[in-house]
Amino acid sequence: MARTTGSHADITGPRVRRAALRLFAQGGYAAVSMRAIAAEVGVQAGALYNYTPDKQSLLFDLMRSHMDDLLTSADFDLSQDPLTRLKSFVEFHIRFHSDRPEEVFIAYMELRNLSPDNFAQIEILRSTYENRLEEILREGAANGQFAVADTKIVTLAIIAMLTGVNTWYRQGGRLSLDQVVAQYWDMVRKAVGAG
Amino acid sequence: MARTTGSHADITGPRVRRAALRLFAQGGYAAVSMRAIAAEVGVQAGALYNYTPDKQSLLFDLMRSHMDDLLTSADFDLSQDPLTRLKSFVEFHIRFHSDRPEEVFIAYMELRNLSPDNFAQIEILRSTYENRLEEILREGAANGQFAVADTKIVTLAIIAMLTGVNTWYRQGGRLSLDQVVAQYWDMVRKAVGAG
DNA sequence: TTTGCTTTTGAACGAATGTTCATTAATTAA
DNA sequence: TTAATTAATGAACATTCGTTCAAAAGCAAA
């Protein structure tokens, strides 16, 4: 038997990516075999190579499209004041990340499994995102809305704090996402010294 | 040739653990072979099994001794007021973790590579640590020193924020550890609504 | 110097790894 | 209906994996 009934590239392709996403998030890149991904799709391992040149590209493509998605979605109205934009950032970050737990998990855990070239590309995207927050903090420090001594440190601290939500937040848990957003905004607002 | 000159169990044992620590932190548990660990020690793979029953135990032992070390070191003077204890916690957490980047990295990244039994044990130790911070926050909220709505969330937020230091702090960088501690204490103090 | 114990070697085990490719079947276009 | 194209199989490749174990060699005590 070779090609099976109902087989289509435009169906199998996305399924390969989704299976890789799920399995990488679950077990880690190194622990997931191409055969395991193929089994999840319902196909033999060889068929995967119609959709990716190799396993490394599969990981990289997942990461890059996640980061592209992040940067496209993180567009804040630059005409607004820094405090308003900071609030938008906090809310956006929490909601965007809680919507994509698997992509986020991979983006943070599998960096070391990227080839050096691929790692460098992802790092650029990541620092681009960080810079958007730092720019908000810089402007707020300049116009006196915020009291922050070192915008770089505060940027990293805020992002670490917000991303941490993904380690424990589950839909249907004790708190609604609205409540989570409100709590974190309260902490961030205070931390940057905005009354 | 079999046993080599100068071979001793009390020397090789710790060296196996240190090699595993370094390599797991560098490449990830799943990506590091027993042969690679053996090569780092300067021994054949078979010799490792004089010091660990299997690869999984090697990982678990590293994690458990790290967590034991953490809990032993994290003893705060319960007679002090919550604000003072919170400051002690922040300083302790940053210094302890920045002293052990490899152990910390493994403890956070390799949880999913633990067997279910081992995972459960580590999780208990981890939540024990979290509870020490939450207890400080609860007492401070009760005596009016802190303004925190949900101690559980604030606990997780603070720990995520502080642990994030390990992703960027390097000795000899732009900021001294004293400066880092001061900055983070400033943010935490404000975030919990303390003066 | 001999004896017994400890430590390491090095080969071997079966299983699993990423990837390639000739073959085959399903689909599409003519 | 036929021909061309696309998609999948399944076997095979050379490596590598964690682990075991008999044999060998260093060491310490008698």
Image (cartoon, coloured by chain):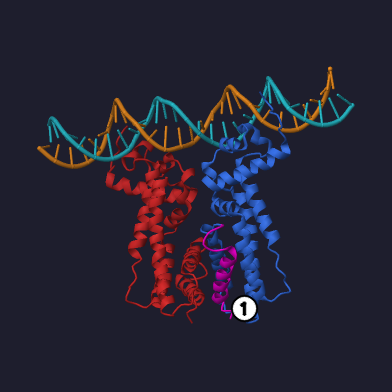
Chain colours: A red, B blue, C orange, D cyan
Q: Position of residue C17 (x, y in %)?
A: 46, 37
Q: As displayed, is residue B19 above or below residue A160? A: above
Residue depicted at x 36% and y 66%: A74
Residue depicted at x 63% and y 60%: B96
- Magenta segment, principal secondary structure? helix
Give the structural element (helix, strand or loop) at label 1: helix
Q: Quadrant of the N terminus of chain A?
A: top left
* Relative side of A97 to A72, left or right: right
What kind of residue is marked 1? Ala
Front-lying residue, A3 or A76:
A76
Front-lying residue, C19 or B181:
B181
Residue B20 painted magenta: no
Q: How busy is the neighbourhood of tag 1: few (under 14 within 10 Å), some, or many (20 plus)?
A: some
Q: Position of residue D27 (x, y in %)?
A: 77, 30
**Which residues lie in the magenta part?**
B171-195
Residue B192 painted magenta: yes
Residue depicted at x 69% and y 40%: B13
Picture quarter containing residue A6? top left
Q: Position of residue A192 (x, y in %)?
A: 49, 75
Picture quarter containing residue B35? top right
Front-lying residue, A23 or B12:
B12
Q: As displayed, is residue A174 above or below residue A112? A: below
The chain under label 1 reads B
Q: As displayed, is residue A85 above or below residue B174? A: below
Q: What residue is shown with label 1?
A: B141
